[in-house]
Image (cartoon, helix red, strand yellow):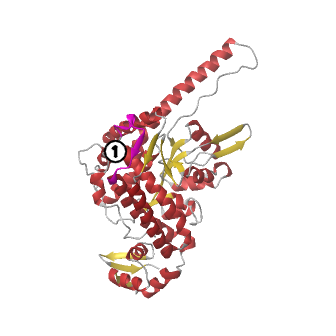
Amino acid sequence: MLNDGIAQLPDNIYGYLPDILQSGCNLFDDKTERDIFLLSTLTVISGCLPHVYGKYDNRSVYANIYLFVVASASSGKGVLNWARYFGKAIHDHKRETSKIDHQIYEQTVKDAKTESNKANIEFSEEPKSKRLFIPANSSSAVFLKVLSDNDGRGILFETEADTLSQNLKQDWGNYDTIMRAAFHHEPVNQLRRNEDLEVENPCLSILLSGTPEQVRNLIPTPENGLFSRFCFYSFPLKLEWKNVFTHTGVDIEQTLRHISEKIFALYTILEEKQGVYFDLSSTQKQTLNECFETWQKELFLLCGKEIIPTIRRLGLITFRISMILTCARFEKELHHLEIIKCTNIDFEIAMSVIEVLIDHAVNIYSILPQQQILTGKKAELYHCLPTEFSWDVAIKQGQNMQMSEATINRFLRTCYFKKTDYGKYQKTK
């Protein structure tokens, strides 16, 4: 079960987004839909920024992020499908180029066979299969081949997480090790009969949606390496009917196709460059370090050591989101820039987004099977609280146990509690 009071992205960040993102987000009035759309488009754009990199923990890192949108069936997760449009022009161009290359190759083979009776004819290498979006139901060999054919880059986009879960259970489809390695751009390889595939520097982005049960199917425990590599955004089912005939007069598809062309133009510029180096200012680096040191202590107190890999990788994801936002803001100037510095507004947006996503990570952490038993101060606070209580009672009780207000608030947003009214809560277990 998901908590009803889970945090949403701050409203004030939307007015400061880069134009290319703001124009898309303005298409959605519902706060949850707008949040999902923003996070999903950030994920898609993260797979459309070739050769943009920065240094994090002394390693070169690229913009790629993994996102899992979690809610019960028919809750409105489908809005993330609109984010696919941000990469559509790139994907269509790659597919059309690949189609033409294969037609030329097939005609060359046909002509050679017609002109020669020799048993063995050497033909040119078969064309690569170019695409941006990679199907989740691919075999591990095909998945790695597609990455290899696309210079190690691609976006795994799947709206039904069970498709991926079922695939990973098959011997031929088990590429979760590739997903884990690709998060850090570590080399991946596969040796099969007559085929030796290796991707030296994979840059993979992943966008999934599914139900809480589908999360548990894919990631059964926090110790599974995939959990700490994903951002999560979760929300409960709203018991209200949506007017499906409302029309604002804006053609969403047409607007997003226009944005898609802008992303394609940005992608084309970056493909032609040797590299664009992204960096934070010294003040931004200090702020990131200080905030995550505090958050790590709070999360350790709340969840234990199993959450530490998640909070540490969210630090890297903050850096990557800052990179994406800055590239989007400088889309028209990138053709002549070799170095880009993160703007203060983009860094502040990234930090605001991550602070909310920490709450969502804790919420998902709490629904995993191995985390159903409360321990430590969480258990102590839970048992001290009455079945129904107010926010100030929980804060006072938690602070008596040396828990910070932020830590208590995060605990209240987990599946162990339900928000019944403003400032009012109820135990759920």
Q: Quadrant of residue 412?
A: bottom left
Is 219 or 43 nearer to us in this picture?
A: 43
Q: Can residue 304 be seen in this view?
A: yes
Look at 44% across and 87% down and name the residue there: 384
Is 177 or 143 nearer to us in this picture?
A: 177
| Image position of 118 with respect to 161: above or below | above
x then y, percent, for residue 330: 35, 42
Q: Mark 1 points at which residue?
A: 329
Q: In which quarter of the image is residue 106?
A: top right
x then y, percent, for residue 126: 62, 28
x then y, percent, for residue 50: 48, 40
Q: Which amino acid does label 1 sit on?
A: Arg
- Mark 1 Cα within 10 Å, few/some/many (few <14, many 20+)? some
How many numbered circles are shown? 1
Look at 64% across and 20% down and name the residue there: 109
Look at 50% across and 50% down and name the residue there: 55
x then y, percent, for residue 151: 56, 37
Q: Is residue 234 visible?
A: no
Residue 21 relative to residue 203: left or right: left
Does residue 335 belong to the magenta stretch? yes
Give the residue at the far left of this rendering: 249
Is 192 or 322 nearer to us in this picture?
A: 322
Give the magenta-colored segment's residue range: 331-344
Give the residue at the far right of this rendering: 119
Give the residue at the far top of this rendering: 115
Which element carries disc 1, helix, strand or loop?
Answer: helix
| Image position of 6 with respect to 247: above or below | below
Q: In which quarter of the image is residue 238?
A: bottom left
Residue 206 relative to residue 28: left or right: right
